[in-house]
Image: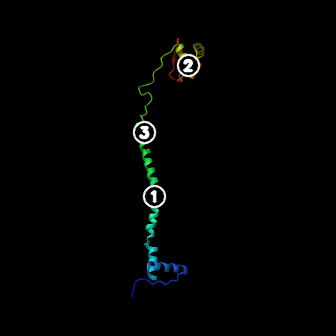
Amino acid sequence: MATNNIRVVGYLPPPYHEKLREYMQSQSLTESAAIVAIVKQFFDGENGSEGVASQELDEATAPLKAQIALIERRLAVLESAFVSSQRSKPARRAPYQYGPPPVLPPQDITQLARRLGVSAATLEEAAQKSSDEFRDWSKRRDPAQRSWCKKGELFHPNSD
């Protein structure tokens, strides 16, 4: 019988020869056909174990796929909430949107004393000091950190 197949001569250890015999009987194959089938399975992967391995892999990864899907849904909810919160935020307003801040009018001693949180007598006493000392003193006490100077009977804000 002429064939293009290459002849292989080998010696199997007894435990493997026993397994080969069991395989031959379970598959109803000759010894050479069993060896060819085993070699094909090894090199070509032509056995049912690939399908089983694929099925086992699918079963093992199914819970992970479900968790990933849940995380993706949660992420989508968070993204939509973030986008909607960005849309609903009012635009930041520039300071002094309606023009410059109001100019403080000159104030008499009682008005300025109330603004600085001191008595009229304390204010009068401080106004007796030099103009630089009074300017520093009033600036430390003014809520807007404005310095004041005395001109006649009124106190005028400085334009520091």
Q: Position of residue 84 (x, y in %)?
A: 41, 40
SS class of the residue under badge 1?
helix
For the image shown, how many numbered marks are present on the structure? 3
Question: As drawn, is 134 to the left or to the right of 89?
Answer: right
SS class of the residue under badge 3?
helix
Labels 1 & 2 near each other (Cβ < 8 A) = no
Q: Is residue 13 visible?
A: no
Is residue 77 or residue 49 the one in the foreground? 49
Cα separation between marks 1 and 2:
73 Å
Q: Which residue is found at the position 41% from the left and 36% from the top? A: 88
The residue that label 3 is drawn on is 85
SS class of the residue under badge 2?
helix
> Callout 3 environment at 10 Å: few (<14), some (14 to 19), or many (20+)?
few
Locate residue 30: give its quadrant.
bottom left
Q: Residue at the far top: name it.
A: 153
Q: Mark 2 or mark 3: which comes first in sequence? A: 3
Front position among marks 2 and 3: 3
Cα separation between marks 1 and 3:
35 Å
Is residue 42 or residue 60 the one in the foreground? 60
Question: As drawn, is 152 to the left or to the right of 94?
Answer: right
Mark drawn on residue 62: 1
Name the image quarter holding the N terminus.
bottom left
The residue that label 2 is drawn on is 116
Q: Which residue is found at the position 43% from the left and 42% from the top? A: 81
Mark drawn on residue 71: none
Q: Say above or below: 39 vs 154.
A: below
Mark 1 is on which residue type? Ala
Q: Mark 1 or mark 3: which comes first in sequence? A: 1
Question: As drawn, is 101 to the left or to the right of 135?
Answer: left
Cα separation between marks 2 and 3:
43 Å
